[in-house]
Image (cartoon, coloured by chain):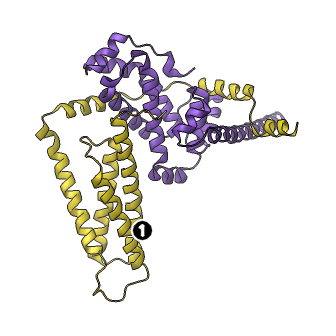
Chain colours: A purple, B yellow
Amino acid sequence: MSRFSSVNVHPAVVRRLAAGERDAQETVYRAYASAVYTMAVRILRDEGLAEEATQDTFLDVMRGAAKLERAQALGPWIRTIAANQCLMRLRSPWHQRREALVGDERSAPAETDRALDVDRSLARLPGQARMVVWMYCVEGYTHEEIGRAFGRSKSFSKSCLARAWRHLAAQRDQAKLCGADAQAIGSAMR
Amino acid sequence: MNDQTNRAVDQPSEAEVEALAAELRSLPELSPPPRVWQRIEARIDGARRPLRRRYVPFAVAASLFAATAATILILFAPRPEAPAVAAAEPDIAALLAESRAIEARRRQMPVLFVPSDVERVLQAHIGGIDASLNRHIREGADAEARQALLVERIELLESLEHVESYRQRELVHQVVF
């Protein structure tokens, strides 16, 4: 389930957000900031860019809140703006050139070894594939919605996910082999 | 049968995708540092300041930027009476034409009152390149060095144009998907 859908904000707060009240703006920020920032860090792999994307997402939310018709639509709307902010940065020629230079060594903070493995594998995917994987697997977008977001077809999203999955599976196999080698070396030394 | 086998090879099964999704969802949630909210507050407060105070810094920055850009365009413009040009000069002329075309497109866009951080960073980088170009001209650097700077300038301008057009769309809140 998307982190955005697990957040509940009272409709009265949404009405006050639409009226531009500062405490409501802060409440909405506190409620959704982690969801937005987590998505941005996992997709962009750069904490500075993720901070910018988070900031610009909420500025857009605050500027456009008056046009939000249904309070229930707040979460999906913020998620859409956040995804667009990430996509915009991924598509920037500047970011693409930078990403090519930075290489594979980026990973976001993770707590356990397993989480670190998953996170590293995700980091090694190209930006576009990372975004498709995250949107489909974590945020619950359909292939059709992802295709539309990229200005492409549904099959673009499907094939991107399949390629990413193969890539991740290959990395996992590689990690298992390395783990087995390390275990064998450890046993031999004992 | 063959189709099914091929699909099984090419596409992950639902269970495999679900397993990947479960792993991704188990990644820890991250919190933005407190400075993000502080910046948002500052931007909201900035947007609420009186019109004149709010726009003076941007107007000054925009004037400086325009003046520098104009200087570069004048200095780099190909002149009919110029002597035989170096090999890279025709490329420079083409790059300048491309740069001018982007600037012209950007001028046609409605003005965004408060530039985002991304836009400010891009503008600062473009300003830095303009300063380097000016220095190269003063010091008589070769055409290749100027060409490299112009390529970088165009890439940054394209990024800036992309960000600005995106913000235009977002400001009218057309939800893309």
The answer to whether one can see residue A81 in this image is: yes
Determine which residue is flagged by label 1: B148
Q: Residue at x 50, y 16 (%)?
A: A6
Question: Which quadrant of the structure image shows residue A112?
Answer: top right
Closest to the observer, B94 or A148:
A148
Image coordinates of residue A19 in percent, x first then y, are: 25, 19
**Image height of B104 relative to B163, above or below:** below
Q: Amino acid at mark 1?
A: Ala
Q: Secondary structure at mark 1?
A: helix
Image coordinates of residue B122 in percent, x first then y, are: 35, 51
Q: Residue at x 64, y 32 (%)?
A: A118
**Image height of B32 relative to A103, above or below:** above
Classify mark 1: residues with Cα within 10 Å, few (<14), some (14-19) or many (20+): few
Closest to the observer, B132 or B20:
B20
Image coordinates of residue B12 in percent, x first then y, are: 74, 34
The answer to whether one can see residue B36 in this image is: no
Q: Residue at x 43, y 20 (%)?
A: A73
Quick one: quadrant of the N terminus of chain B?
A: top right
